[in-house]
Amino acid sequence: MTKLKTVNIKGKEYVEVNERLIYFRRTYPTYSLTSEVLEKTDKSILILATISDDEGKVIATGMAEEEKGSTFINKTSYVENCETSAWGRALANFGIGLDTSVASADEVNNAITNQDSVSSKTPTKIKLDIGDENWEKVMKWVVANKSMGLTKIVKTLQQKYTIPNLAKAEIKKNI
């Protein structure tokens, strides 16, 4: 594979989505990259990006969620930012720009920007790996956001964490 241009963020190299997209379009001109809005509210959007081959077979997907106003860019362009993130994840899952991380440079920058202002309302800002010592934090977030419903809560948490089936049952008990 051609070496793609990277940016350095806190000592790690990340391939930006535009570089992944340019490579994809040049290398796979008959493949498609589509976006589907799974859910849009007045506060957030959830988008699924899908890469299909020339026969329509799904090759890779990527999902992203953005909260309106959560970052400087998201004050005016949360829909566009979400679509770009979903594309980046789909392209990474397809294997493009996967040197060190599936996360895009923008996702990493957002995480760094937001890590000092952890919000109990947005799991994308919770910096933890689910484990016994952190499960209580996740459950508090679940209880605080139970109006979202089980499906959206699980989808939102699964974007950042592996949620085992037993954990899903525990989440359901708390909403």
Image: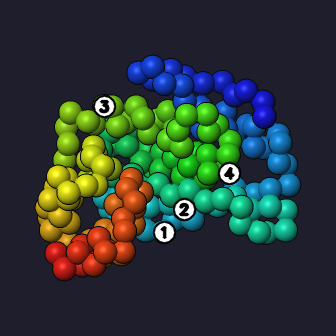
Q: Rounded to the nearest whole Å, what is the CA distance between mark 2 and mark 3? A: 24 Å
User: Which residue occupies 61% across, 59% down?
Assistant: 61
State which quadrant residue 74 falls in.
Answer: top left
Q: Which comes sooner in the sequence, label 1 or label 2?
A: 1
User: Which residue occupies 66% across, 24% down?
Assistant: 5
**Closer-to-camera residue (118/93):** 93
User: Is residue 138 depicted above or below 128 in this figure?
Assistant: below
Q: Secondary structure at mark 4?
A: helix
Q: Amino acid at mark 4?
A: Phe
Q: Rounded to the nearest whole Å, what is the CA distance between mark 1 and mark 2? A: 7 Å
User: Which residue occupies 51% across, 58% down?
Assistant: 63
50 horizontally vs 115: left or right: right
Assess whether mark 2 and mark 1 are in contact (beta carbons under 8 angstroms). Answer: yes
Q: Rounded to the nearest whole Å, what is the CA distance between mark 3 and mark 1? A: 26 Å
How far from the left and from the top, in percent, is residue 155? 39, 66
Residue that numbered label 3 is attached to: 113
Residue that numbered label 2 is attached to: 48
User: Which residue occupies 39% across, 53% down?
Assistant: 160
Residue that numbered label 1 is attached to: 38
How far from the left and from the top, in percent, is residue 88? 58, 45
Q: Which comes sooner in the sequence, label 4 or label 2?
A: 2
Q: Secondary structure at mark 3?
A: helix
Q: Secondary structure at mark 2?
A: strand
Residue that numbered label 4 is attached to: 94
